Structures are given as C-alpha cells and as structure tokens.
Image (spheres, rainbow, N blue to C red):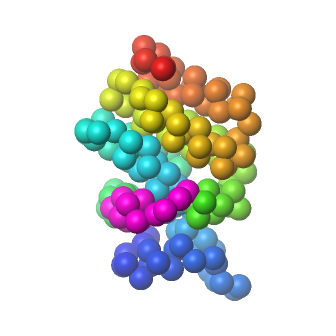
Amino acid sequence: MLRTLKDLFDAMLPPQPGAPPADAEHQLQLATAVLLVEVLRTAPDVGAAERRAVVDALKDKFALADDEIARLVELAERTARDASDYYAFTSRINEGFDMPRKLRIVEHMWRVAWADGALSAHEQHVLWRIADLLHVPHGAYIHAKMRARDAMGGSRDDG
C-alpha cells in the first residue's frame, strides 16, 4: 500500500519499464480513489454516508485492509485537492481497466453521489465529465446510474 508522500508522487508517474506489477496496481488504486473523492468533494457538507460509500467502493474494487483503505482515501483527498484536471487519473484507469471495471467505478461514483439522499447538478456534471473521459458509452453510463439508484433504495432524487 502507499505509505509515504514519495509513494504518492511516484504513483502519479508512468510505470517504469520493468517496474513491479504492484506499482501499476497502486497507481490504479490511487486514480480510482481520487475519482471517488472528486464526487465526494462536490457536496457542500460531506457526511458519514458519503465517506462510507467511498470506503465501500474501494473495498469492492481492491483487496485492501481497513488501514490501507484509510491511507488511500487520505492520499486521494490530498491528491484531488492539488489536481488541476482529471486526465492523469482517467488515463491511468483507461490503460489499466477494461470497460466492465470502468463501469463499476462509475456505478460506485453514483453511489457516493446518492449517499446523502440527493443528487445535485454539480454531482451529475462531475460524473458525466469523468465517465466521458473514461470513454463510457452514454447508454452504459445511464445503466450504471440506474443500478446505483436501485442499490441505494431506488427512492433517491435522480435530478
């Protein structure tokens, strides 16, 4: 797991030829966590439900211990604050994940957005922008949204 600030910076660099497979996995973990945190950051007041949705998504995507998840979220929050765009993260995911795995990320992002029981226009815009950068077809994007809504109880305001 990423343990230091140096690991964070190293994770954002392209993998070096001959680098261990774990390095590429760490980069995917951080990129995924940053995108989830970006949805979290769209809410004016972040509550426990949204944070829990981020943790649950990371547990679903990666086999990490609770302390590793906590550290990953911390690094993702710091990285998201300092990022100027989504490209570094979406390009890493585009290189490392096939379409079903990217769709699962989008679905988890919807779950984070709906965790507080409401869906804002800003959350929808961020989700649409990220899904577009992940090259997710519009129909698949809408299906991911509906699956997330149904998983969250189906009674959420879907804007």
Picture residue at 52% right of the left edge, 74% below the top: 11
Q: Which residues are magenta?
A: 74-86
Picture residue at 57% right of the left edge, 28% below the top: 145
Q: Position of residue 85 (x, y in %)?
A: 53, 59
Left of 119 or right of it: where is 49? left
Q: Quadrant of residue 7?
A: bottom left
Picture residue at 59% right of the left edge, 38% below the top: 128
Left of 127 or right of it: where is 81? left
When the figure is inspected, residue 8 is found, relative to residue 46, above or below; the finding is: below
The main secondary structure of the magenta stretch is: helix
Q: Quadrant of residue 4?
A: bottom left
Q: Quadrant of residue 104?
A: top right
When the figure is inspected, residue 79 is found, relative to residue 116, above or below; the finding is: below
Q: How many marks?
A: 0
Is there any visible trace of residue 76 in the rendered image?
no
Is there any visible trace of residue 103 in the rendered image?
yes
Q: Position of residue 53 (x, y in %)?
A: 39, 39
> In the image, is residue 70 part of the stretch drawn in magenta?
no
Instruction: Work out whether residue 49 or residue 127 is closer to the camera in this orientation and state it.
Output: 127
When the figure is inspected, residue 77 is found, relative to residue 51, above or below; the finding is: below
Q: Position of residue 26 (x, y in %)?
A: 52, 68
Quadrant where the N terminus is found in the figure: bottom left
Q: Position of residue 56 (x, y in %)?
A: 41, 43
Picture residue at 43% right of the left edge, 17% below the top: 157
Left of 73 or right of it: where is 147? right
Instruction: Work out whether residue 154 or residue 91 is closer to the camera in this orientation and state it.
Output: 91
> In the image, is residue 82 part of the stretch drawn in magenta?
yes
